[in-house]
């Protein structure tokens, strides 16, 4: 627990920049994507935890349900933004996806491992907690939820953003297998959180 706490404090002190700027569109879309991603990852962790105890699975299930509530709230907010200003909102959506959605923990550090997040992400991908496929499915879910393909009355920049967003899912699907292959080929690493036990990412 000491190493987990140390990692948390390093992360808080990192003053990370999520790339959301000060725009409500950027911030809300980023947060929504992140909330859905954490809902999926906790739900998948709950499924894995069930093999080791029902109580552990229930805890992860409760956390996943909490993340789902957050996701629903932010989905409604972004839906309203699309209603009020579809042009600016689709441009912000495309800009966020071009930058890639970085999870808040991407700068995490435990005092030992400079590549901690990459190693952690490889493990999560390999065991099915959160994968490139999940990332692509979140995008497709949001595109369908907000009817991005059917937006009308957009500026030239807005139409360009719309085309980019609607075609991105197909491009991401082509990258899924490569991402999984990289995770499977990653070398064994040790994690201080589990007394430096080596884990195959």
Image (cartoon, rainbow, N blue to C red):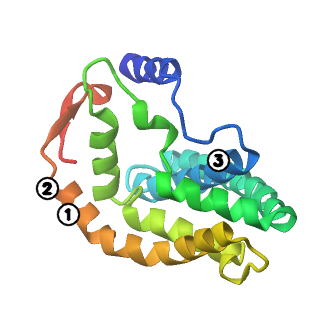
Question: Residue at position x 46%, y 62% from top?
Answer: 135
Q: Is residue 145 above or below residue 96?
A: below
Marks 2, 3: nearer the viewer: 3
Residue 108 position within the rendered picture, expressed as x and y whole percent measured from the top left = 40, 29
Q: Between residues 171 and 38, which one lies in front from this camera angle?
A: 171
Q: Earlier in the sequence, mark 2 or mark 3?
A: 3
Q: Between residues 144 and 4, which one lies in front from this camera angle?
A: 144
- CA–CA distance in space, label 3 to label 1: 29 Å
- CA–CA distance in space, label 2 to label 1: 6 Å
Number of other residues with Cα within 10 Å of mark 1, as a class: few under 14, some 14 to 19, many 20 or more: few
Number of other residues with Cα within 10 Å of mark 3, as a class: few under 14, some 14 to 19, many 20 or more: many
Residue 13 position within the rendered picture, expressed as x and y whole percent measured from the top left = 50, 17
State the residue position of label 2.
Answer: 185
Instruction: Name the mark on residue 31.
Output: 3
Residue 46 visible here: no
Q: Between residues 115 and 147, which one lies in front from this camera angle?
A: 147
State the residue position of label 1.
Answer: 181
Q: Is residue 122 above or below residue 149?
A: above
Residue 3 position within the rendered picture, expressed as x and y whole percent measured from the top left = 36, 20
Question: Residue at position x 53%, y 71% from top?
Answer: 164
Residue 147 position within the rendered picture, expressed as x and y whole percent measured from the top left = 71, 78
């Amino acid at each position: 627990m000491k190493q987990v706490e140390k990692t948390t404090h390093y992360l808080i002190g990192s003053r990370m920049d999520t790339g959301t700027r000060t725009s409500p569109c950027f911030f809300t879309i980023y947060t929504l994507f992140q909330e859905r991603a954490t809902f999926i990852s906790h739900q998948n962790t709950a499924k894995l935890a069930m093999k080791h105890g029902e109580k552990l699975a229930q805890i992860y299930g409760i956390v996943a349900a909490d993340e789902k509530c957050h996701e629903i709230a932010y989905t409604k907010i972004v839906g309203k933004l699309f209603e009020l200003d579809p042009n600016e909102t689709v441009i912000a959506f495309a800009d966020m996806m071009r930058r890639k959605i970085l999870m808040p923990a991407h700068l995490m550090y435990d005092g030992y491992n400079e590549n901690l997040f990459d190693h952690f992400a490889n493990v999560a991908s390999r065991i099915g907690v959160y994968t490139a496929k999940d990332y692509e499915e979140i995008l497709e879910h949001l595109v369908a939820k907000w009817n991005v393909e059917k937006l009308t009355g957009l500026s030239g920049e807005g139409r360009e953003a719309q085309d980019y967003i609607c075609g991105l899912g197909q491009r991401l699907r082509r990258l899924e297998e490569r991402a999984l292959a990289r995770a499977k080929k990653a070398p064994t690493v040790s994690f201080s959180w589990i007394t430096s036990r080596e884990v195959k990412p």
